Amino acid sequence: MSVRLEVGSADLLRCRFALSPLWETVAAVRTLAEPRRQAYHRPWLREVAAGHDPARTAPLALLLPRTGSTPDFLTPPPTGPHADIEEELGRVAATPLVQVEAELRRTLHGPGRDGPPPAQAAARLLADPGRTLRELTELLRDCWRNLLAPRWARVRDLLEADIAVRSRELAAAGLRRTLTGLHPAVGWEEPGTLRVDAPHRAVRRLGGAGLLLLPSAFVWPALTVVTDPPWQPTLIYPARGVGELWREGGPAAPRALARLLGRTRARLLAALDEPATTSRLARAHGLSPATVSAHLTALRESGLVTRRRIGRAVAYARTPLGLALLRGGEEPATAAPPPR
């Protein structure tokens, strides 16, 4: 079975990337309850376990079944590239109660759910949709503060790095290649249908609405597609590099390179498998932004890294010379052969 999104020429100009702290919050709550999502997040799980009360988040967890429907009003697609958590929560709180009740009922008693919910808890959620909406909004705010807000800078760095890589790919290879590279479950059928493997069938003609692409740290290994009005069609996919999200210190640098450049500069050069900002590198390596900036300036003046502006941020990336040096003098695969 699959979800099929019919893409027209007008949609090509309306496909965009965005970040959503609210989506990541809801996905983090789901990760707490689903072992298959936890492999890359064990350091985070150990960190939040002491302050996490499963009874407190039970009403929200009840609406996040492993299979079946999830209320779309919990995660309205962001309207801009960098959503603010309070703005997102405000949109949740403003959801029409008719929509709230319909989506609660569909989630609790609709087809595909992995087992019926506890009858008393489900009845309470449905008895007063207004009260339920207020309680869920505050519960989402608490989950954000306790589970994600102290670590959001690290997660945001990962998501922004993913968008930077995908944006370059989009410019170089086009939308089709970019979309089908998001996840093995995504395919393309001519003349213009995006196919997403899913446990249900649906067809949605985008009709000029475009497609919203949300990278996520906590959706791994799954993929989520939102097609129901009134939201813009949205594809939430696992961000690149999620396996490195909670690792401290960054990758080790070759000893010879550390002797040549100094240990810190060598570690920074080794960390640039993907473009990264000064602040991201500083957090990953436990250094001050000023220290990282000074080292990156030296690497750039030596021709080992380059910098470019991506939106509001400046990201650094290795040059072919920097990659060759990191590999011990081996030429990058894409480099032209030396003259004879």
Image (cartoon, rainbow, N blue to C red):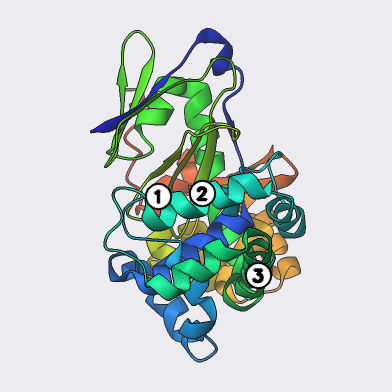
Residue, disc 2 = 103
Q: Give the vertical position of 152 relative to 312 (above or below).
A: below
Q: Position of residue 180 (x, y in %)?
A: 35, 30
Contact between marks 2 and 1 (CB within 8 A): the answer is yes
Quadrant position of the N terminus in the picture: top left
Q: Nearer the viewer, residue 178 or 77?
A: 77
Q: Position of residue 281 (x, y in %)?
A: 60, 63
Q: Give the vertical position of 238 relative to 264 (above or below).
A: above
Q: CA distance from mark 2 to mark 1?
A: 8 Å
First along the sequence among labels 2 and 1: 1
Q: Looking at the picture, which amino acid does disc 1 mark?
A: Ser
Residue, disc 1 = 69
Identify the secondary structure beneath mark 1: loop
Q: Is residue 253 left or right of residue 76?
A: left
First along the sequence among labels 3 and 2: 2
Residue, disc 3 = 135
Residue at image x 37%, y 46%? Answer: 223
Q: CA distance from mark 3 to mark 2?
A: 16 Å
Identify the secondary structure beneath mark 2: helix
Q: Nearer the viewer, residue 54 or 162?
A: 54
Q: Position of residue 15 (x, y in %)?
A: 57, 26
Total numbered circles: 3
Contact between marks 3 and 2 (CB within 8 A): the answer is no
Residue at image x 43%, y 85%? Answer: 46
Quadrant position of the C terminus in the picture: top left
